[in-house]
Structure formats: C-alpha cells, structure tokens
Amino acid sequence: AAAGSSAALAQQAGQIVLYSGTDFRGAPYVVDGTRQYLDTNFQVRSVRIPSGEAWELCTGVKFNGCRLFTQSAADIRMDVGSARPIV
C-alpha cells in the first residue's frame, strides 16, 4: 500500500516505512506485514523499523537475497522486491 507524501507518517507496530531518500525523506512506501511482491518504483535509501521489531528486506520477490534489519537505517541503497517481519 503506497502512502501519501506526508512528512510525518503515523507508523504502527507491524509496519515499516521505506523511503526514496536518505534520513527518512522522500517518497514513503508503507509495508504492513509479509509482502512477497513489492513495487516501490524507487531504490530504497532509508527504512524506518519500529523499536523492538526485526524485518527482512529482500532484493528479489518471494524473499530472495534478504538482509536482516533490527533497527531503522538512515542511509542504505537497496532495491526491495519483498519484505517480511521476523518473529
């Protein structure tokens, strides 16, 4: 589900926000729960992860080429094709 360009998104537990810019700026893309196919239309440059949660962001669809994130990252460079929370 794509979100609007609101600078201050109300983030909920169980969802992450991918951003097209570093430092949590640029176009936001909200991911709520496991998603096998993501189409962000941009290279992810930062990600906001709720405190205490861990997520896998994967370059391929269906969870191929995954990288584990246990906290928000303000400066990354990653094409994200799928994502899922790790419980």
Image (cartoon, rainbow, N blue to C red):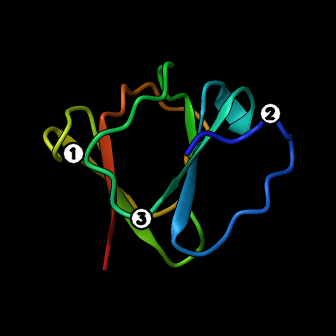
Mark 2 = which residue? 5
The residues tagged by marks 2 and 1 sit, at their Cα atoms, a distance apart of 27 Å
> Which callout, 3 or 1, points to the residue nearer the camera?
3
Q: Position of residue 51 (x, y in %)?
A: 59, 73
The residues tagged by marks 3 and 1 sit, at their Cα atoms, a distance apart of 16 Å
| Amino acid on which disc 2 is placed | Ser
* Kind of element beneath mark 3: loop
Residue 11 placement, left or right of 1:
right
| Amino acid on which disc 1 is placed | Cys
Q: Are marks 3 and 2 in contact (CB under 8 Å)?
A: no
| Residue 48 visible to an observer of this rendering | no
* Kind of element beneath mark 1: strand
Residue 70 placement, left or right of 17:
left
Q: Position of residue 86 (x, y in %)?
A: 30, 71
Name the quadrant containing residue 6.
top right
Which disc, if any, is residue 35?
none
Mark 1 = which residue? 66
Category of crowding for the residue at label 3, using alpha-carbon neighbours closer than 10 angstroms: few (below 14), some (14–19), many (at least 20): some
Category of crowding for the residue at label 1, using alpha-carbon neighbours closer than 10 angstroms: few (below 14), some (14–19), many (at least 20): some
| Amino acid on which disc 3 is placed | Gly
Q: Position of residue 43 (x, y in %)?
A: 47, 21
The residues tagged by marks 3 and 2 sit, at their Cα atoms, a distance apart of 21 Å
Mark 3 = which residue? 33
